[in-house]
Image (tube, rainbow, N blue to C red):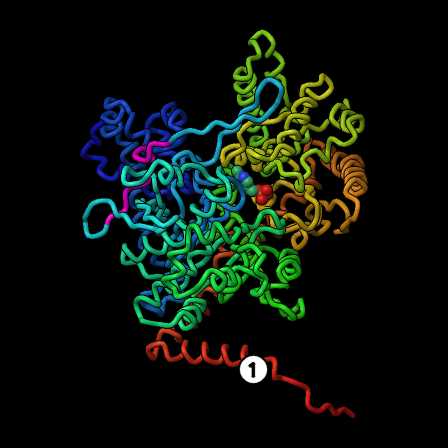
């Protein structure tokens, strides 16, 4: 269809992903054609490619639509100008500053399925907040043809994975170009031959996100598949993906003329960034390897996310030699010297190459993602700094967070607009501003929340109907679905990956006790579950199957529901509509967790093990803790003790509090807790706070370090390299010669 003359910027609006967190822009597209908006997967680019010309022409002549359109355009212009952004007001005394953020996944909106879970959502929201704050950042990631899988279940409840191939020209992205030439391409060495990588651009508000794609006719069939699936392949595929992300990513930026001073590696996947930066410095400035290593290191920030050893990437020497043999020769290194960069013990010829260790060796700042995770990380990686006391292992933390405007329900946002100062959108880190949540009348807050719960129940019924039909259940046996769940009943949400350490079945441990809870005639409870298991995690799939079997039993059918294909959309309905968000990982394996933050923004109360973020957020006035932060030797004992603690909390505290109603059916004390939750957690667990901390604690100091090294033609880097070498060389000669004490 042809875009009418009176709506010249419609394409531009569709291509700036700011609509994914701007309600006005989204509702402009929805207003055009409600059905198509939904059927296009809420993808305005696909929508504009399929829309009926007549509808567009009508919109172009509709005064109300035009006014809405003008408002959205004006707002975007103001937003993009960045006039009153935090960075402009506080730090913009440096010219030509640029930070780059690398991640294997980005969760920005559902029509771009290049994320699998929390890590990706965090990366997407890091960019959204960087954009809101005016921080000069570019993002770099991979553009997967199929991305992560869509989940559906077979009639036995066994997870099936469907991969949907994307047509990039129907996504809100464009080929990246330089100086108006054709699509930008770079090459990356792999297995002794060059692989061609095309660069795409997704505009996230003010932030460009460059996405790399190897599915090109220039490449062999095998190489075309590198950017096919997220976390889909074996070790060999994984290292090739990580080479494309790290080395290809840095080359793409160089080819675009984009020169970041500081590179942030989000998780070990992108740690090859560090070695490519070293190579570039050696080529450009004729540095020695050590000189380049020292200078590059000053500009690297690394965040680790995974306290589960198996979640970190390890590569055997054969794979490193196969894919990077030519590369490290260019650096003047042999295999063992290169392997040492990724080993805790450089002299251990059997140790595999670990991406986390590589990143830690080559970063100015290493950080974990919560206070507790910092301690766990120090212990876990202490051997990377042999002999250093745990307290001196150089790891700090910035606690994860969520992007407020991406998760708060529109209904609640409207209440905030009425009762809070308008700054709640731009400065959600301001503690004082959240105090005004107290001004919201309890009745109004409760009605708003009940409306969200009703919407969640309607949504769940629709999904349930659809998924059971797809599983082959005849319509005649689906009558009960219209009565599944009850919009008045205390609703618990459990939405997260089905990994065994997250223990999705803990609440089901004592089926009889659970049946009594959910079927209580006066004070019933219902639970909505959702989550994907990794395609190769048989245990995770087994947990889904047993959960689904239990959901099918008559005692549970209307009260326990599993929603297929957990994604941002399902998550949004859940965190906005439930009353309780349940989280029961095995401490301390949940590095942070973020879904509980999404729910707390919406006044949902958390019930959680004291792990990750909840260990620092919990206080008895806002939510509940399962246990007191104990760790156990025996997992079955732990499950027994903690499931009983959970039932006790439900029976004695949570259910009675929820159903304690005043005259007009209002649970006053519950609403009081909802308010406390928002007031206390709102200002802390938002990505504006998080990104500011990254900027002030890591990016800006690193920027100074890099600039210091970049002066004097590398003399500073040479001096530090020299010093390090001397200390290493002379260390064995250090001795206590005399000790005296009084
Ligand atoms: C927030 C989110 C996650 C991460 O939630 P955790 O609490 O960290 O487990 C995973 N998947 C989706 C779709 C999300 O929105």
The quarter of the picture showing ligand 1 = top right
Outermost residue to the top? 476
The residue under the point 30% across, 67% down is: 284
Residue drawn at x 35%, y 51% is 189
SS at circle 1: helix
Q: Is residue 71 visible?
A: no
For disc 1, the neighbor class at 10 Å (few under 14, some 14 to 19, many from 20) is few
Q: Position of residue 647 (x, y in %)?
A: 78, 36
Q: Return the x and y of residue 196 as percentages of the image width and height.
A: 30, 46
Q: Position of residue 113 (x, y in %)?
A: 44, 36
**Is 168 inside the magenta-drawn segment?**
yes
Along the line of sight, which residue is nearer the eye, 455 or 715?
A: 715
For this rendering, which residue is in front, 209 or 722? 722
Q: Which residues are magenta?
A: 166-177
Residue 618 in picture, x, y percent from top left: 68, 51
| 527 relative to 131, above or below | above
Which of the image's four quarters has the N terminus?
Answer: top left
Any part of residue 611 in sight: yes
Quadrant including the C terminus:
bottom right
User: Mark 1 near ligand 1 (CB under 8 Å)?
Assistant: no
Left or right position of 250 against 264: left
- Residue 129 lies in the magenta stretch: no
**Nearer the observer, 245 or 366:** 245
Quadrant of the image occupied by residue 19 = top left
Q: Which residue is painted at 31% across and 44% down in the image?
A: 200
Counting labels gives 1
Kindly identify the residue that appears in the image at 54 percent across and 79 percent down.
Answer: 729
Q: In this rendering, is residue 487 above or below 741?
A: above
Residue that carries the numbered disc 1 in the rendered image: 730
């Amino acid at each position: 269809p042809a875009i009418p003359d009176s709506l010249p910027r419609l394409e531009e609006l569709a291509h700036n992903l700011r609509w994914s967190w701007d309600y006005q822009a989204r509702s402009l597209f929805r207003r055009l054609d409600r059905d198509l908006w939904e059927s296009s997967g809420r993808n305005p680019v696909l929508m504009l490619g399929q829309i009926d010309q007549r509808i567009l022409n009508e919109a172009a002549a509709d005064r109300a639509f035009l006014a809405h359109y003008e408002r959205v355009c004006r707002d975007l212009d103001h937003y993009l100008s960045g006039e009153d952004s935090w960075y402009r007001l506080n730090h913009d005394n440096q010219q030509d500053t640029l930070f780059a953020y690398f991640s294997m996944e980005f969760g920005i909106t559902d029509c771009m399925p290049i994320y699998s879970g929390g890590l990706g959502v965090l990366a997407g929201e890091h960019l959204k907040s960087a954009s809101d704050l005016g921080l000069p950042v570019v993002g770099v990631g991979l553009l997967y043809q199929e991305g992560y899988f869509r989940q559906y279940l077979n009639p036995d409840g066994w997870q099936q994975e469907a991969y949907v191939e994307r047509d990039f020209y129907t996504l809100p992205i464009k080929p990246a170009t330089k100086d108006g030439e054709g699509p930008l391409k770079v090459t990356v060495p792999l297995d002794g031959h060059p692989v061609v990588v095309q660069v795409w651009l997704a505009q996230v508000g003010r932030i460009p996100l460059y996405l790399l794609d190897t599915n090109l006719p220039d490449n062999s069939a095998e190489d075309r598949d590198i950017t096919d699936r997220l976390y889909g392949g074996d070790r060999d595929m994984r290292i090739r993906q990580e080479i494309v992300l790290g080395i290809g990513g840095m080359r793409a930026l160089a080819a675009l003329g984009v020169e970041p001073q500081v590179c942030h590696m989000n998780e070990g996947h992108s740690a090859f960034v560090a070695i490519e930066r070293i190579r570039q410095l050696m080529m450009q400035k004729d540095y020695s390897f050590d000189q380049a290593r020292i200078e590059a290191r000053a500009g690297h920030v690394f965040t680790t996310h995974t306290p589960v050893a198996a979640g970190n990437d390890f590569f055997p020497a054969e794979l490193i030699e196969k894919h990077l043999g030519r590369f490290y020769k260019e650096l003047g290194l042999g295999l063992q010297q290169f392997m040492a960069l990724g080993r805790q013990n450089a002299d251990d010829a059997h140790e595999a190459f670990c991406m986390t260790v590589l990143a830690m060796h080559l970063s100015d700042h290493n950080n974990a993602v919560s206070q507790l995770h910092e301690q766990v990380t120090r212990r876990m990686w202490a051997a990377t700094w042999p002999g250093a006391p745990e307290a001196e292992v150089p790891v700090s933390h910035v606690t994860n967070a969520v992007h407020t405007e991406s998760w708060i329900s529109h209904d609640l946002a409207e209440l905030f607009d009425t009762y809070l100062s308008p700054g709640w959108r731009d400065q959600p880190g301001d503690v004082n501003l959240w105090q005004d949540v107290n001004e919201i009348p309890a009745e109004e807050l409760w009605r708003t929340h009940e409306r969200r719960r009703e919407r969640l129940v309607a949504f769940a019924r629709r999904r349930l109907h659809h998924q059971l039909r797809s599983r082959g259940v005849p319509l005649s046996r689906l009558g009960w679905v219209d009565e599944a769940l009850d919009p008045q009943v205390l609703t618990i949400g459990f939405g997260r990956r089905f990994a065994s350490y997250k223990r999705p079945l803990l609440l089901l441990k004592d089926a009889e006790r659970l049946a009594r809870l959910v079927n209580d005639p006066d004070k019933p409870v219902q639970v909505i579950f959702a989550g994907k298991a990794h395609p190769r995690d048989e245990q995770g799939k087994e947990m889904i199957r047993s959960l689904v079997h239990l959901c099918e039993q008559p005692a549970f059918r209307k009260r326990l529901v599993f929603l297929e294909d957990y994604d941002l959309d399902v998550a949004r309905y859940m965190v906005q509509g439930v009353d309780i968000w349940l989280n029961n990982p095995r401490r301390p394996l949940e590095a942070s967790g973020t879904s509980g933050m999404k729910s707390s923004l919406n006044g949902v109360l958390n019930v959680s093990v004291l792990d990750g973020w909840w260990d620092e957020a919990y206080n008895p006035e806002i939510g509940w803790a399962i246990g007191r932060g104990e760790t156990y030797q025996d997992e079955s004992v732990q499950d027994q003790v903690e499931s009983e603690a959970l039932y006790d909390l439900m029976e004695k505290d949570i259910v009675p509090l929820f159903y304690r109603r005043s005259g007009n059916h209002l649970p006053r004390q519950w609403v009081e807790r909802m308010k406390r939750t928002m007031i206390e957690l709102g200002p802390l667990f938002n990505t504006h706070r998080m990104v500011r901390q990254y900027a002030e604690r890591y990016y800006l100091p690193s920027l100074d370090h890099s600039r210091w090294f970049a002066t004097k033609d590398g003399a500073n880097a040479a001096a530090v390299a020299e010093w390090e070498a001397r200390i290493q060389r002379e260390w064995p000669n250090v001795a206590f010669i005399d000790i005296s004490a009084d």
